[in-house]
Image: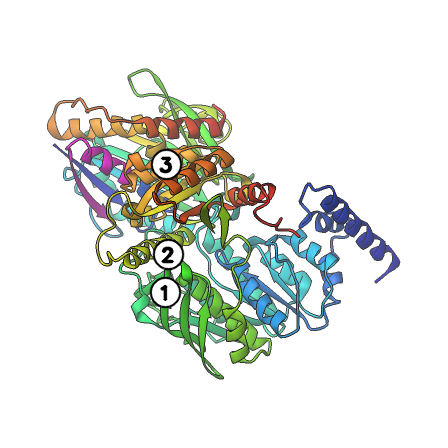
Amino acid sequence: MELRVCALYPDQMNIYADRGNIVFLQRRCEWRGIGFAYSSAGPGEPVDASGADFFYVGGGQDRDQAMVAADMVASKREDLAAAVESGAVLLAVCGGYQLLGHSYQLGAEKLPGLGLVDLETVREDGPRLIGNVAIEVDLGSGPRVLAGFENHGGRTYLGAGVPALGRVLAGQGNNGVDGREGVRRHNLVGTYLHGPLLPKNAWLADHLITLALERRYGTRPELEPLPDALEDAAHASARAAAGA
Amino acid sequence: MSVLFGTKVAAARALGAASRASGRGGGTTLPGRVLLRLEPEAIARLGERLDDGATLVSATNGKTTTAGMIAAVLAAEGRPPVHNRAGSNMSWGVATALLEQRGREGLFEVDEAWLPRVAEQLDPALIVLGNLFRDQLDRYGEIEALADEWAATVAAREGASAFALNADDPLIADLGRDGEERPRAGVSYFGIEDASQALPQLQHAFDAKHCRRCGHPYEYERAFVGHLGHYRCPNCGAERPQPEVAATRIELRGMEGSSATVRTPVGEIQLELPLPGLYNVYNALAAVTACLRLGVEPARIAAALGGMRAAFGRVETIDLGGAALSILLIKNPAGANEVLRTLKLEAERSLAGSGTAGAAVPAGSGIDLWIALNDRIADGRDVSWIWDADFELLGEAVRRVVCAGTRAPEMALRLKYAGWETARIEVVPEIDASLDRAVARAREGVPDGGPARLFALPTYTALLELRKLLSDRGLAKEFWR
């Protein structure tokens, strides 16, 4: 078995140490004897919808994000849409999450979005939403907690009937108002829990690895358990920091 | 001084004395805080008393050390400056130093976000800008935005201040040119020109990818520390300016320090620095450039720098119950990477000393570490940055590591995924218990009872806690005295 990961714009969308997520996936595959194939798609480069099963996009500075938004729509929209429709995992974090929707209103500028999910992001008056955050998530195996850190000026609003990733237990979430955080569609996950989200939530990493392998090999694999004492302690630490 | 202002100054000063006498600490900022509450323009008014002008030093990394170096040179010249030497670098730290010290000239390290405001108030004769790295995004925001604010400050002060700028940091170097790319008046550049010190590859935390002028990605011929290096924009042609103060040959000697041959407009000098790492060579180049501007002769600058010890907390060694404790602050990826590089060199050097040079560090040997990761406001609440620092560099050179601090488990997890063996990693969150544990571990590594060494890598507030602990045990002077 092999996990095929494709990072989108790793040189532009990496502001909160997003590479931690890739390192985390790689190690957990290696320790289980699962192969790990890494590729990346930068500006102007096409995406192979069937070549990878796990796509990742992180957060960037405003300037980089504006460039990436235009480039992504021009060079990757169709293929990413096809990948998501056919069950690929797409984990989009922070700035990457904002690019999944219809558009992102950033001051006078309106950044185009991929339109993969029905959501809008706007920059409103008021402070950036910054701090530790914990949300309750149910990805089909009962409620679990995701813990992390958010730091975003944009407020995201989901369309009617669009499922959020989770319910805010502590922190701000999509917009600081409606108690919802992130978005889900098929195996797409968008969230404001930024940067190294997976190391703080090993259970989510393993869940997404399982989904990606299922897409490739047709059956859902049973992942070998790992000695996760430090992972569990880190999760508890991040959760405690959020006060949840 | 007006009678009313004089009364406010006296009140603030008395509060500082009372605070110190009570032993609760905090004397480095309290008087300034009080004075600024009473008199918002106090920095400007007190600054007028500095007849020979003021120098401001700012950077993400190295501002305390650079200011400390300049202070050492000025002191050796018989010109001890009014200086916020305890590293309290927001406006109240500057105000406190102005309140409590007398002198003809001022020297202040200033927090990056506070630089525009302090520069406006203090009317400095010289501004020294070292670097901008990603750091505490929850507090400072994006570094491009910070660079924009600095650009406005430099533009507003052209002609009024001189500037010493790092040519190797494109975010800093660009401040020395105006909108038409003309060099601004009064700018001196410094940089490194020893190609043998280049990094083998660009680091993960690489913060200046796009040309400040046109947005096109820079091309790097080489990088020395993070994004500091030799670069140019292939699109608009913007490139690294020629530095007039340049290190042309550098030798790093682990924790012992380094030596550098430095070209200046008034002749070549040889620096012997008692501080480790290439990052301190950059700090020294900033200090040399500043001191030349301040009228000190090059040979006297070199002599003074050779004699100085590390600025508070940045690197110091303390005897702790049979182990020599060296403290190296870590607070962001670029700074942490330099500390890790220095420690790797140190591990290799100590092996070379034991006659196993060139070999990989064998199991059971290597250096002992204590890493304390806090997430208080002054550290940045967001600890994501540890995943951008290249802890992978050091894994095999480490014998034992004890992780401490408010986010100790996350530090330990980072090390595990950097490939450090989990059997070598321990988590003890409490600062005092973890330090004792780390000392005991380090001493176990020296079975014949010889001198043990322990390297402490705290974030900023963990450093303050560590200093307090050492001071309570009578091992280090309270730093605000």
Q: Which residue is mark 1?
A: B252
Q: Which mark is residue B58?
A: none
Q: Residue furthest right?
A: B3
Q: Which residues are magenta?
A: A21-41
Is the C-beta separation of discs 2 and 1 under 8 Å?
yes
Task: Report x, y in % for residue A146.
Answer: 38, 26
Instruction: Indicate the chain on which mark 3 is placed.
Output: B
Tell me the crowding category of disc 3: few under 14, some 14 to 19, or many 20 or more residues within 10 angstroms, Cα based.
Answer: many
Q: Identify which amino acid the numbered label 3 is placed on.
A: Ala
Tell me the crowding category of disc 2: few under 14, some 14 to 19, or many 20 or more residues within 10 angstroms, Cα based.
Answer: many
Q: Which residue is mark 2?
A: B342
Discs 3, 2: same chain: yes
Q: CA distance from mark 2 to mark 1?
A: 9 Å
Instruction: Tell me the residue at 43%/32% (across/down).
Output: B428
Mark 2 residue element: helix
Task: Report x, y in % for residue B333.
Answer: 40, 50
Mark 3 residue element: helix
In the rendered view, would you say B10 is above or below B173?
above
